[in-house]
C-alpha cells in the first residue's frame, strides 16, 4: 500500500515538470509582458529605457530557459518568488486566497450531495413513473444551462426581485457564499442526479435484490442496507473528481460574484501577465489532479474488497 | 427486470427513430439558420440607435434593445453563427485529431504509445477552463484562440477512447484473418478498425457539442473568447451584465439562446447514444 502511494507521488514529478514548462513557455510567447501590461493599464506613456530597466529588475530580459531554471530552483528550495504586480510573496498571497475557495468548494459539494443523492434515489425507485420523468426532465434542463447563466438567473431572482441575498459577495461570509455555492450546486446536481439514478437503478436490477425480495426482506431494508451502500462507491468517486475541479477555483463563478478565491486570483494574474502567480496556480492544479486521482483510487480500495485483496497479493 | 418482448422492442425502436428524426431536423435547422443568420434578423445587429436604447421587450423588439439601442433579437440571431459554427468546428477537429493520435498510439505501440499517452496525461492534468484561460490569454483572445485553447485540452479524451477501442480490435480474430489474407496497414485501419471504433467516438462527440458550446461561451464571458462588437452569446452576456438590475432582458436573452441550442444538441446526442447502444438493437429474426 505504502509503495503504491509513493509510486503515485513519483508520477507527479514528470507531470509537474511538463506542465510548469508548458505554462512558462506559453506565457513567454504571449508577446506582452507584465511591464508593458502595467503601463498600458495606467495609460502612461513611458520611454523604452524605463521599460527595459523595469524588465531587467524583474529578470525578464534573460533568456527564457534561464528564467525557467531559476524559477525551478527557487521552487525546489521553497521560494516561489514575488508577485510582479504587488511585490508580495507568491506563496502567502496564494495561501490567503485558499480559505475562500475551500469554503466555496465545501458548501457547493454539500449542497450537491443534499440535492442530487436523494433526488437520484427517488428517481431510481420510481423508475419509469411520473416522478422519474419529471426529475429527469429537470436534470436535462440543468445540464443545458451554462453556469454563468445560472448565476445571472439566481442574481436576478434572489437578489434583485426578492432581495434576500447580496448581489456581490462582501467578504468571505456564510451569507455571501450561498449564491455562488448554489450556482455551482445546481449545475453539478443536474449531472449527479442522473448518475446516482443510473447507479442505483443498475444495482436494483441485480439478482441479489430479487433474491432478497423473494426471501421476504422489506424493500426499504434492501434499498438502504444493500443497494445504496454498494452504489456509494461510484457516487463517491464522482464527487471526488468534482472536488478536484472545484478546488482549482471556478474562474467564471468566482469572478461573477467577486468571490476572492484562487480562481479569481488566477484570472487576474493572467490578465496582468503576473507570471509567478500563474506558475503557482499551475503547480497547484497539477498537485490537485494527482491527489484527487490518488484519493479516488484509495477510496476504491477501501470500499471495494475485491480491489483491496488484489493489492495485498500484489 | 423482465426481458422486453419483441413487440415492446419494436415500439422502442420506432420511438427512437422518431426522436432521432425530430432532434436531427431541429439541429439541422439550427445549423442552417445560423448559416443564413444575416438574412434572418429583422434589424441590423450592429446598427446603433441611441434614442431607442435599453427599450423593454415590445412587438417591434421582442428581446428589447441594449445600451446602444441595438436590437437584441437580431444580435442573438447573428450570434448563433459565431457560437454554433465555432463549436462544430472545434468538436470536428478534436474528434479527428484525437482519433488519429489514439489509433496511431495503439497501432504502433512501444515507446511511441508511452510518450504520446504521457503527453495526453499532461494535458488532462490541466483541468478544463484553466488551461483554456492560459492559452487564450497567451494568444490574446478572439474566437479562434478560444477554439485552439479548448481543442488543446479536449483531444486527449478522444485519443484515449480511440486507443482503447483500437487495442481491443487489434487482437480480434477477424483482424488477424484480414491481415493473413494480405491486407496492408492502411486497408486494415480504414476498412476494419475505423468503422468498428466509430460508434463510441461519434457518441462522445455528439454529447460534447453542448458542453463545448457552453465552455466556448464561458471563455467569451471571461473576455478570453470573442471580443465585444462581434455578436457572440457569451461575450454579449458579460458585456451587458451591468444591466441585469435594471434591464434584465438584455442580459438574459443570449443565455436563453445558449440554453435552447445546448438542449437541442444534447437531446440529439442522447438519442444517437441510445440508437447506437447494442442493448437497444433488436436481433434480426
Image (cartoon, rainbow, N blue to C red):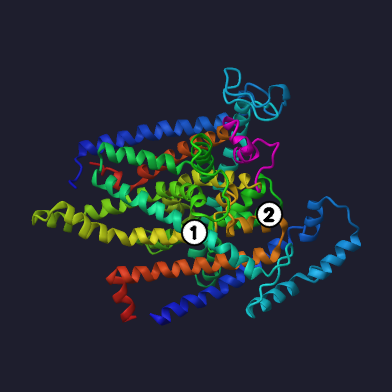
* Left or right of A102 on screen, residue A230: left
Q: Is residue A99 magenta?
A: no
Chain to which mark 2 belongs? B
Which of label 2 and label 1 is nearer to you? 1
Q: Assign the N terminus of chain A to one quadrant of the image.
A: bottom left
Res A285 → quadrant:
bottom right
Q: Which residue is mark 2?
A: B137
Q: Assign the C terminus of chain A to one quadrant of the image.
A: bottom left
- Do the residues indicated by labels 2 and 1 lie within the same chain of the protein? no
Q: Position of residue B154 (x, y in %)?
A: 54, 55
Q: Position of residue B41 (x, y in %)?
A: 62, 24
Q: Which residue is mark 1?
A: A103
Q: Position of residue B4 (x, y in %)?
A: 20, 42
In this orientation, which residue lies closer to the viewer: A76 or B196? A76
Residue A282 visible in this rendered orientation of the protein: no
Residue at point 55% right, 47% down? B215
Q: Is residue B248 magenta?
A: yes
The magenta stretch is: B224-250
Amino acid at each position: 500500500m505504502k509503495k503504491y502511494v509513493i509510486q503515485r507521488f513519483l508520477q507527479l514529478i514528470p507531470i509537474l515538470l511538463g506542465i510548469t514548462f508548458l505554462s512558462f513557455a506559453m506565457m513567454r510567447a504571449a508577446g506582452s509582458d507584465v511591464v508593458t501590461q502595467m503601463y498600458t493599464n495606467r495609460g502612461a506613456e513611458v520611454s523604452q529605457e524605463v521599460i527595459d530597466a523595469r524588465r531587467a529588475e524583474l529578470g525578464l530580459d534573460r533568456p527564457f530557459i534561464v528564467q525557467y531554471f531559476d524559477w525551478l530552483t527557487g521552487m525546489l528550495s521553497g521560494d516561489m518568488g514575488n508577485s510582479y504586480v504587488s511585490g508580495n510573496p507568491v506563496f502567502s498571497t496564494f495561501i490567503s486566497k485558499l480559505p475562500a475557495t475551500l469554503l466555496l468548494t465545501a458548501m457547493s459539494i454539500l449542497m450537491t450531495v443534499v440535492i442530487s443523492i436523494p433526488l437520484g434515489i427517488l428517481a431510481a425507485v420510481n423508475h419509469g413513473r411520473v416522478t422519474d420523468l419529471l426529475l429527469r426532465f429537470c436534470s436535462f434542463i440543468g445540464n443545458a444551462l451554462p453556469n454563468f447563466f445560472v448565476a445571472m438567473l439566481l442574481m436576478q431572482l434572489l437578489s434583485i426581485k426578492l432581495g434576500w441575498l447580496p448581489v456581490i459577495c462582501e467578504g468571505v461570509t456564510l451569507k455571501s457564499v450561498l449564491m455562488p455555492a448554489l450556482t455551482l450546486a445546481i449545475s453539478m446536481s443536474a449531472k449527479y442526479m442522473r448518475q446516482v439514478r443510473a447507479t442505483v437503478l443498475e444495482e436494483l436490477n441485480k439478482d441479489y435484490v430479487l433474491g432478497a425480495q423473494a426471501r421476504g426482506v422489506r424493500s426499504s431494508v434492501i434499498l438502504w442496507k444493500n443497494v445504496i451502500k454498494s452504489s456509494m462507491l461510484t457516487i463517491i468517486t464522482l464527487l471526488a473528481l468534482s472536488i478536484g475541479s472545484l478546488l482549482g477555483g471556478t474562474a467564471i463563478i468566482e469572478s461573477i460574484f467577486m468571490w476572492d478565491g484562487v480562481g479569481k486570483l488566477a484570472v487576474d494574474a493572467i490578465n496582468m501577465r503576473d507570471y509567478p502567480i500563474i506558475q503557482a496556480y499551475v503547480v497547484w492544479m497539477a498537485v490537485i489532479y494527482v491527489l484527487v486521482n490518488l484519493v479516488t483510487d484509495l477510496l476504491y480500495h477501501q470500499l471495494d474488497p475485491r480491489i483491496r485483496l488484489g493489492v495485498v497479493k500484489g | 427486470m423482465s426481458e422486453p418482448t419483441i413487440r415492446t422492442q419494436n415500439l422502442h425502436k420506432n420511438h427512437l427513430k422518431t426522436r432521432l428524426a425530430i432532434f436531427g431536423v431541429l439541429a439541422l435547422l439550427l445549423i442552417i439558420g445560423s448559416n443564413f443568420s444575416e438574412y434572418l434578423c429583422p434589424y441590423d445587429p450592429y446598427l446603433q440607435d441611441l434614442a431607442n436604447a435599453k427599450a423593454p421587450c415590445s412587438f417591434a423588439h421582442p428581446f428589447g434593445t441594449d445600451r446602444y439601442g441595438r436590437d437584441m433579437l437580431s444580435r442573438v440571431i447573428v450570434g448563433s453563427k459565431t457560437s454554433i459554427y465555432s463549436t462544430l468546428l472545434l468538436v470536428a477537429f478534436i474528434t479527428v485529431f484525437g482519433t488519429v493520435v489514439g489509433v496511431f498510439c495503439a497501432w504502433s505501440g512501444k515507446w511511441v504509445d508511452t510518450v504520446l499517452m504521457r503527453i495526453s496525461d499532461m494535458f488532462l492534468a490541466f483541468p478544463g477552463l484553466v488551461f483554456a484561460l492560459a492559452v487564450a490569454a497567451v494568444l490574446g483572445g478572439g474566437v479562434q484562440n478560444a477554439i485552439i485553447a479548448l481543442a488543446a485540452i479536449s483531444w486527449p479524451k478522444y485519443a484515449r477512447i480511440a486507443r482503447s477501442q483500437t487495442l481491443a480490435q487489434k487482437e480480434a480474430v477477424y483482424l488477424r484473418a484480414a491481415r493473413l489474407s494480405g491486407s496492408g496497414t492502411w486497408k486494415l485501419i480504414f476498412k476494419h478498425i475505423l468503422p468498428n471504433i466509430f460508434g463510441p467516438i461519434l457518441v462522445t462527440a455528439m454529447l460534447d457539442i453542448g458542453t463545448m458550446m457552453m465552455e466556448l461561451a464561458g471563455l467569451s464571458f471571461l473576455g478570453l473568447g470573442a471580443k465585444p462588437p462581434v455578436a457572440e452569446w457569451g461575450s454579449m452576456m458579460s458585456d451587458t451584465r451591468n444591466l441585469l438590475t435594471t434591464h434584465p432582458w438584455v442580459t438574459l436573452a443570449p443565455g436563453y439562446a445558449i440554453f435552447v441550442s445546448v438542449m437541442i444538441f444534447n437531446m440529439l446526442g442522447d438519442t444517437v447514444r441510445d440508437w447506437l447502444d447494442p442493448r437497444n438493437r433488436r436481433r434480426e429474426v
